[in-house]
Image (cartoon, helix red, strand yellow):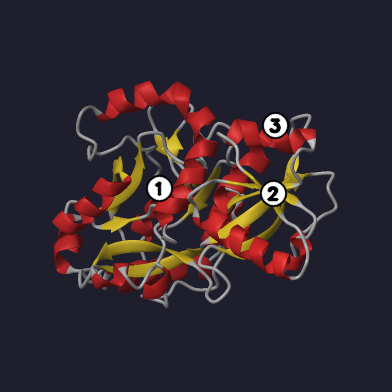
Amino acid sequence: MLTHSLNRTALRGVAATAAVASLAAFLAACGADSDAATRTRSDAAGTVTVGALSNGAAKETTLKVSEVKSISAQLPKSVAERGTLVVGIGALPAGSPPLNFVGQDQKTLTGSEPDLGKLVAAVLGLKPVVKNSTWENLFVGIDSGKVDVAFSNVTDTEERKKKYEFASYRQDNLAFEVPKKSTWNFDGDYRNLAGKTVAVGAGTNQEKILLEWKDKLAKAGKKLTVKYYQDNNATALALNSGKIDASFGPNPAVAYHVTQNATSPHPTRNAGQFSGAGATIQGLIAATAKKDSGLAEPVAAAINYLIDNGQYAKWLAAWNLSNEAVKTSEVNPPGLPLDNS
């Protein structure tokens, strides 16, 4: 399956080291109810702070953003009258930096995804209420009406459109991570992998894509060596020691790792991206609401307002995710095909 759940395998590997220390406090704060509303940072009226408490994963930035009446007027009456936007995040148990994780205070949920949910809520004139859960319970929350809209790295797929409606906000990309001193770049061409040794997570969509490239190169008489390691730390050690030329994983995980490594003895960089949906379609990450809820349209309008007025670009830049920007938020754009989902 080429879905978000596969990307989570690699993201969790990157998240593990950062999350272990905070996990106990996180679970204690949430209690036994995995759908409990999660503590988030309060902002002054007319502002939203992104990148707060990120422990170096982001640059904290305060953005001016207020209700846009012409957009909030598009909200379903029930949501407008309630005055809150229940934002679903599927970060339990350990989170996935830089997307969603417990901040340095050991209790506050931070990350690029809840930050965007707060920005959208501000444009809609609503108070954000963030509910954190496991990935599986995130969709249970949407289905039951306990969650209005999920901002949780959900890939737009044709299969999911049977039950949900989408407002796209980020490209769904994979990326190659190499030592900063390396001169190699992917440049969007799998043939540049000839003669290279690349690490990848087993059972992921990036593994599927990489093995397809390996087969193509083999037919052309060229070799691509694929390596597997137990966790992210082992992969980083192999990259630092020269046992592998690159690692291949979700772009947000690479962005997080590059940020964390910036001042280390072994800095790394992003050496190129590829759509998480494969060569035929650009994968998209989208805000996800129950089908026919009437939320996708106003959420997309809010995101487009943020794009047009610069807050969107600043949000991405704060989290080192500018290379996943979209030009516009689309309602139910073409998603991962049914025969590849």
**Residue at left offset 30%, top offset 71%:** 161
Q: Is 23 located above or below residue 54 in the figure?
A: above
Side (left or right) of 43 relative to 30: right
Q: Which mark identifies residue 237? A: 3
Crowd rating for badge 3 (residues with CA inside 10 Å; few <14, some 14–19, many 20+): few
Q: In which quarter of the image is the C terminus?
A: bottom left
**Residue at left offset 37%, top offset 39%:** 42
Q: Do the residues labelled 3 and 2 touch (CB within 8 Å)?
A: no
Q: Nearer the viewer, mark 3 or mark 2?
A: 2
Amino acid type, mark 3: Leu
Marks 3 and 2, how far apart in space? 13 Å
Name the residue that disc number 1 marks: 114
Q: Is 41 located above or below residue 148 in the figure?
A: above
Does dot 1 land on a helix, a strand or a loop? Answer: helix
Side (left or right) of 127 relative to 185: left
Q: Quadrant of the N terminus?
A: bottom left
Closest to the observer, 77 or 222: 222
| Upstream in sequence: badge 3 or badge 2 | 2
| Upstream in sequence: badge 2 or badge 1 | 1
Amino acid type, mark 2: Val
Does dot 2 land on a helix, a strand or a loop? Answer: strand
Q: Is 121 located above or below residue 291 in the figure?
A: above
Give the image location of residue 94, x and y in percent. Answer: 41, 34
Marks 1 and 3, how far apart in space? 31 Å
Name the residue that disc number 2 marks: 198
